[in-house]
Amino acid sequence: MLDARLAKRRAPFALDVAFQATAGSTTVLVGESGAGKTSALRLLAGLDRLDDGFVALGGERYADAALRLHLPAWQRDIGYVAQDYALFPHLSVFENVAFGLRATGVERGRLRTLVEEALELLGIAGLASRPSMQLSGGQQQRVALARALVLSPRLLLLDEPLSALDLQTRRAVRGELRALLKRLPCVTVYVTHSPVEALVFGDQIVVLEQGRVAQAGSREDLLRRPRSPFVAELVGTNLFVGRPVTSGPIVSPTIRTPEGDFAVDDQAGSGGVFLTVSPREITLYARLPEASAQNVFLGTVREIIPEPPAGDRVRVVLDARPPLVVEVTREAVGGLRLHEGMRIHAAFKATGVHVYS
Amino acid sequence: MLAGLLLVLLGLPLVSLVLRIPPAALLDRLREPLVLEALRLSLVTSLAATLVVVALGLPVAYLLAMREFPGKGAIEALIDLPMVLPPTVAGVALLTAFGRNGLAGHALGVLGITLPFTTLGVIVAQAFVAAPFFIGAARAGFTEVDRKYLDAAATLRATPARAFLAVLAPLASPALLAGAATGWARALGEFGATITFAGNMPGITQTMPLAVYLALQSDLDAAIALSVLLLLFSLAILLTLRLGPSRLAALVARARRPAR
C-alpha cells in the first residue's frame, strides 16, 4: 500500500497532493499539462526531493520532509517508465532489460532467465539482440516496461506511457497494457492527460488541477458525481453548483445557481449542492416546446462538434443562461437545420437533473 | 578570395615543410639516437600527462557538468587559465610553485620528489597546459547527455557511480576521446612551459619540440626532419579524431535527438 503526500514549492504553482493506493490497483493521476502530474511522479520515484510531505510504501518510509529523510531513487523498490521511455541508446534490448538486475548483482544464469521471462511477458522475446535505437515506438514502450517490471517493483510509476505512440498503436497497446496492469501485484501510479485513459486504467482516479487534487474517487464516482468544472468536462457532462430555493412562493422544487434556476425532482437537502445534466437528457426545439419539460432555456448555437469525430452523434455547445452542452443525433441536426449562430430552445425534465451534495 | 588567402597561410608552410625533405632522408634521421631519444621521451611524457589529465580531469568535469556549487565560476576560470596563459609564464609559475624554493617545493622535497629539470617535471608541465582541453571537452560531453538516461539508471537501482560508468561515460565517450586526443596533442607539442620548468636535457627533459628548436640552431635539415615527424603525428591524431569515433558520435547524436 502506498501512502503519500507530495508537496513541492515551485513556480508557477505549488504542488500539494495527497493520496493512498492499494497493492494490485492502478491509480491514475490525470490533469492538463502543467497540473503537476510528472512532478508528483518524480517525487514518488525519488528523482526530486519533497519540500513537504512524505512517501511511504508498505510501511517503509521512502521520504519524509519533517524527518529530512530522502531515499534516492536507486534505493527505492520502484519501476519507472518515462514519457519517452529513455532506453539506453548504447545498449541492446537485452542489456536494457538486464540493466537493473546487473545493478542489484543478480548472478548470471538467473539474470538471463529473468530477462527472458520479462521479454516473453511483453511479447518481445524476438527483439533481445536488437539495438534499442532500431525499435518502433510500440516496441520501445514494451522494452521500457520489461526493463521496469523485471525487477518486480512494489511500486510501478508510468508517465504518459501511451502518449509517444501513434494513434493506431496506442489503441492496440491500450488494451494489452490494461490487461497487464490488472495482473500485476504492485501499486501502479499512472500519469496521463487523457480522460479516456484515466477512465480505462483508473481503479482510482485522482484529478489534478494546478497542483491540487480537484477530485479523487472511483471511475463511477467521477462519472456520476463530478465536483469540479474540469472533471465535468473530463466525463463530458454539464455541471452547476447551487442552493435550493426555500423562500417565496415555491411551485416545484428548484435549485438556484449563478447561471439560472433549475426545476428538479429532489432538492437533496438544504445546503450547497452540485447538479449535473447529461447532454443526452437535453432536447433541442426550434419553437418553444409545449411538452412536459420543466426546464427550458433559449440560447445561441456556438459550436457543433461531431462526437466521436466519425460517429452518428453530435455535441452542440449553447450560449445560454445557463450554458449547456447538448448531445443530439445527426438526424436531429438535419431536421432542425442546426447551424452556428442559430437561436434555439433547449429543454429537459426535472428528473433529468442529477442533484447531489 | 580572403578565405583562399587564409588557406594559403595555413597550408603553404605545411606543404613546404614536407617538400623540403625526401622520405629516405627522413628515415635516416629517424635512426639518429638523439632523435630517437627525443621521440621516445615525447611519447612517454605526453601519454603519461594525458593519463594524469584524464584521471584527475574526469571528476572535475563531472562536478562542473552536473552540480551547482558556490565558487564554480572561479574554478572554471582557473581551469581555463592555462589555455590563455603564455606557456613560458606557465613554466615560471610552475617553478615558483614546485621549484626547490617554491611554495610547495619544500614539501615535495621532504617526500623525495623533485620536479624541476626532471622527466616528472615535463609530465607536470604538459599536464598543466593540456588539462583545460580535456576538461572542457569532457564537461561539454557530460552536459550534452540527456538527464533522462541518468534518471532511468537511478530508477533501475544504479548507484551514482554505476550510472556514471554504465551510462554517462559511454554516452559521452566521443567527447571524452576527442578531449583526450586534443589534450594529448597539446602535451605532445608543449614547448614553453617545458623548457622553462624542466629545461632542455637530452634523454631527460628534451622532448621533440625542444629537440626541433635545438636542432634549428645547428642543423636545419635535422630540425626539418623532426618537424615533419611531429607534423605526421599531429595529422594522425587529427585523422583519428575525425574518422575514428565517428560511429560512436553518430550513435550519441541520435541519442541526443530531442524527443518527439
Image: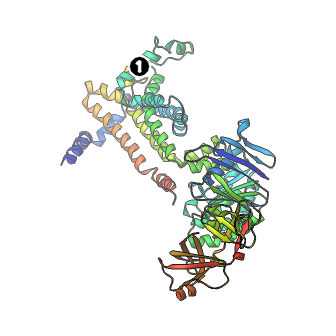
**Left or right of A61 in this view: B19:** left
**Left or right of B236 in this view: A302:** right
Q: Is residue A273 above or below residue B157?
A: below
Q: Is residue A292 above or below residue A144?
A: below
Q: Nearer the viewer, residue B41 or B245?
A: B245
Q: Which structural element holds mark 1?
A: helix
Q: Is residue B15 visible?
A: yes
Q: Is residue B138 above or below residue B70?
A: below
Examine the image and state in which quarter residue A309 appears: bottom right
Examine the image and state in which quarter residue A221 appears: bottom right
Q: Nearer the viewer, residue A136 or A221?
A: A221
Q: Is residue B90 above or below residue A320?
A: above
Check the residue under mark 1 and report the chain it is in.
Answer: B
The percent position of residue A65, horizontal first and vertical second, equals: 70, 39
- The amino acid sitting under disc 1 is Ala
Q: Nearer the viewer, residue A71 or B106?
A: A71
The residue at which mark 1 appears reads as B93
The percent position of residue B177, horizontal first and vertical second, equals: 48, 43
Q: Residue at x 47, y 45 (%)?
A: B175
Q: Which quadrant of the rendered structure holds the C terminus of chain A? A: bottom right
The percent position of residue A185, horizontal first and vertical second, equals: 79, 60
